[in-house]
Amino acid sequence: MKSKKVALILVVFFVTSFVVGCGGGTPAPDPQEPTLRVGMVTDAGTIDDKSFNQGTWEGVLQARDQLGVEIRYLQPSGTTEADYMREIGNLVDAGFNFIVCPGFKFETSIYEAQARYPEAKFVLIDGAPHDGEFNFLVADNTVSIFFAEHESGFLAGLASALQLEEGQAGFIGGMEIPPVQKFNWGFQQGVTYANENYGTDVQVQSQNVIYQGTFDNVAAGQQLAAQMYDRGVDVIFAAAGGVGVGVINEAKSRAAAGDDVWVVGVDVDQYDEGIYRDSESIILTSAMKYIDVAAFDMIEAELNDEFPGGETLFFDATNFGIGIPENNPNLNADVEQETAEVFALVQSGEVVVSDQLGDLIR
Amino acid sequence: MKIRFNRDYLLSLIAVILGLIAGAILMIVTNNNPFEGYNYLFRGGTMNMQRIGNTIATATPLIFAGLSVTFAFRTGLFNIGASGQMLIGGLCATAIALNVSLPKILLLPLMIIVAFIAGGLWGSIAGFLKAKFNVHEVVATIMLNWIAYWTVYYMVPLYLKAEFLETESRRIPSEASLRIEWLRDFFDGSYINLGIVLAIIVAIIVAFILDKTTLGYELKAVGYNRTAAETAGIDVNRNIMLSMGIAGGLAGLAGLSLYAGIATNMQIGVLPMQGFDGIAVSLLGANSPLGVFFAAIFFGLLHSGKGFMTAMTGIPPEIADTIIATIIYFAATSVVVDRFLENRRKRRETK
């Protein structure tokens, strides 16, 4: 028993001494350095998710190139509040005092962090800090940003219906969370608007509105898309992260075989993801949120000492925070023209898109 | 027996060093300085009270999961279902936490018992299938993982969801959380919680059951040689179910310490990685409760230091994850090291 203990102590000793012995290294960065150090903590999923994380990161990258800030991102090992707090703490301890966090899952972590690290500034995208009981508080060192996903989905739905003229549209969502729901509801309203005002005949049947339930199950996305296309759906709006990748894959293989199927992308312009032959893509258009612009704007504001701390910002049609891509090779010119006209109506408030379920499908 | 233990720990030590060397090579290949990297990795897990607390807290579910795998392993069973058992244990404990109002001193023991029983019943399903129909427990537990995953997926939104969110349970109130104020203050705002105390107690109990009781002896006998144990009059089927039950119960406690200690609520759509890391913890810990404890602390250190290493050195997070995984999987290869040494010894003897 005694020798067992000795052996154990030796194990611990060797391990620690090995690790400690490796010390030295560079000194900690000087916090007085003039350049702003911008950190980002990723949400569930990777930095190259072609969607939310990547969109945010591209804004940060742009800030590095144009504004000369130093940047770094960390990827938490889980999605609990503790995981997020740990990575935020790591960034602060390493001198990254401007932290961008994409996703509503950060709400409670930012609530805690904004109080614990008053010297740091936080940008929370798609959420507002609260204490877990939904008592919201945006502190002076935090900005909370929301997007009008319903308006974005509306425009994409409108453009899809105008382009198709007749047929069926479907929706595949990731988890049933507010931003995804709003994309869905907006999309349905957009299709309906086209039917009522432009004489198109595009239907959304309730069996073709599905939330897969995750953001990473590529195979399931492919399977759901296959079922929908088999049921005669012509275009699927996939607001589903990695599940959407599966949807795009299915559409690509069908298009390569000569089928006439389409996908509407989400968050960023996904045209390039949908290319199946030369420069032909199955992405009809994309329901975009200018996350990169939001992230970049906040960094720029901070550098100009204009950081809107304590505020909750809404990015919608009026400030060009959402929309469809500038170039949509798969849309006819008149469709783009008509969509732009309706976009102006949404901006002026003549057309109001609801962010509620109402009598829509789910 | 004494010599055996020494040898096991030596093997684990070699495995850890091999892992660290493999990680270092990876850092060199990716143009980073391994000394710097390991320095920040270690400091990230230990440089102040808060980080020490976080390291211990991160290790807590790993201790339980490691004990779960160890218990099954010592009795000849391979429990890959710790993740699923964690989910079920955590789900039931969360249900109690959100729906029963009792003083903390009564509520916590109730949650502990419920988590243990729920995880245990889930685990013993695989035991039952093995005993009755000879379904291999590896297959059964992997499948049960996904049944647990989808069970949580439907149960949380149905009964436990928060007002505005479909994908998470309500927040566990502080009366039902393993987190306690003074421990948190002592560790400077870390998410350390009572789970570690429970883990130490449970590790001692497991060691006692395995080494000092008839039950443990019988369970191990079944593990060593099922047929011989049967001939000796041991009820093999009962023991297989019991063993998987206890292993499942231990994993259930891992779920409790994760969902009511580290996390503050239960999210759907996540299969906890700790269940799988528990296999590596168990292997590195040479399948002994004490070894599991230290192996889990080591893994906790890796996990909680990783982010700081990335933040300080510019080693990309993906490479950092790979480094950690490399260390973990090398560390779990002590069996291979054992074989290697054994073969060399034999070869020398035959010469």
Image (tube, coloured by chain):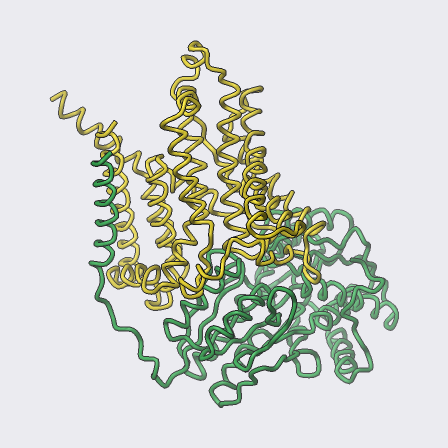
Chain colours: A green, B yellow
Tell me where residue A118 appears, x and y as whole percent.
Answer: 47, 78
**Front residue of B125 and A289:** B125
Instruction: Give the vertical position of A171 relative to B110 (above or below).
Output: below
- Residue A250 visible to an observer of this rendering: no
Quadrant of the snapshot with the N terminus of chain B:
top left
Please state the total of marks drawn on the protein image: 0
Q: Quadrant of residue A353?
A: bottom right
Along the horizontal axis of the image, is A20 left or right of B239? left
Tell me where residue B114 appears, x and y as whole percent.
Answer: 59, 40
Q: Residue at x 72, y 50 (%)?
A: B158
Q: Residue at x 58, y 53 (%)?
A: B176
**Front residue of A157 and B205:** B205
- Residue farthest top in this picture: B231
Tell me where residue B257 appears, x and y as whole percent.
Answer: 50, 49
**Front residue of A190 and B118:** B118
Q: Residue at x 76, y 64 (%)?
A: A185
Along the horizontal axis of the image, is B146 left or right of A37? right
Instruction: Give the vertical position of A11 relative to B241 (above or below).
Output: below
Tell me where residue A89 appears, x and y as whole percent.
Answer: 43, 68
Instruction: Give the vertical position of B335 relative to A83 (above or below).
Output: above
Quadrant of the snapshot with the C terminus of chain B:
top left
- Residue A78 visible to an observer of this rendering: yes
- Residue farthest left in this picture: B351
Q: Residue at x 26, y 48 (%)?
A: A12
Q: Quadrant of residue A344?
A: bottom right
